[in-house]
Amino acid sequence: MIPITQELIKEIADNMLTGCRCYVHTETGQLIAIPDDDVYESDLKELFADDLKELKKNKKSYRELDKPESRDSFEFMVNFTEHLSDDNPLKHRLALVLEMKSPFSNFNHQIDNSGEYRQQWFTFKDEAYKQWVVDQFDRLNWPIQ
């Protein structure tokens, strides 16, 4: 297996964040990112016909990486909340909404109205996704540069 670069890790994480399924060629490190049917309308598949043919033709040469599931995304939100200082009012609001019904939408509402913390959340989430990708490669015993 070819060593995985930090650039590829970032590219995979970015694609996962936008709702794509990611496949990496085990010999070349080539990435194919396909919109997930759960996120996008199926008529987008036409735009990715060549990539889908490549995956079908060389199925054994590609490894699909798992995207974070809802419970993992929830854990990212919990970790971000815990990362904030105890005297931060946002920390208390986020902790409260994480215990309520509809924690994802309520968390996003709080973040969207949090000023400077909005960007901190996006940076935190980007890093969490990159670490998620690194953990995937570690489980596969795939070397990282």
Image (tube, helix red, strand yellow):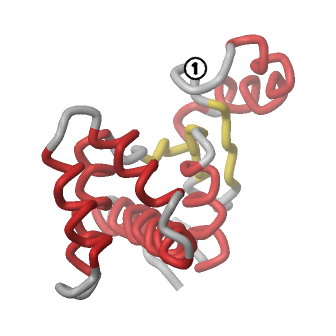
- Secondary structure found at label 1: loop
Q: How many marks?
A: 1
Amino acid type, mark 1: Asp
Horizontal relation, residue 59 to residue 99: left or right: right
Residue 97 is situated, as x and y percent measured from the top left of the image, at 23, 49
Q: Which residue is rendered at x = 69% and y = 26% of the image?
A: 57
Q: Which residue is rendered at x = 48% and y = 75% of the image?
A: 117
The quarter holding residue 129 reads bottom left
Residue at the farthest top position: 43
Q: Is residue 61 above or below residue 55?
A: below
The quarter holding residue 138 reads bottom left
Q: Which residue is rendered at x = 32% and y = 71% of the image?
A: 90
The quarter holding residue 79 reads bottom left
Horizontal relation, residue 106 to residue 41: left or right: left
Residue 36 is situated, as x and y percent measured from the top left of the image, at 58, 28
Q: Residues within 10 Å of mark 1 (few under 14, many from 20)?
A: some
Residue 1 is situated, as x and y percent measured from the top left of the image, at 51, 65
Residue underneath mark 1: 37
Horizontal relation, residue 20 to residue 65: left or right: right
State the residue in front, 48 or 90.
Answer: 90
Q: Is residue 31 visible?
A: yes
Q: Which residue is rendered at x = 53% and y = 57% of the image?
A: 112
Q: Is residue 87 above or below residue 12?
A: below
Residue 84 is situated, as x and y percent measured from the top left of the image, at 28, 81
Q: Is residue 142 visible?
A: no
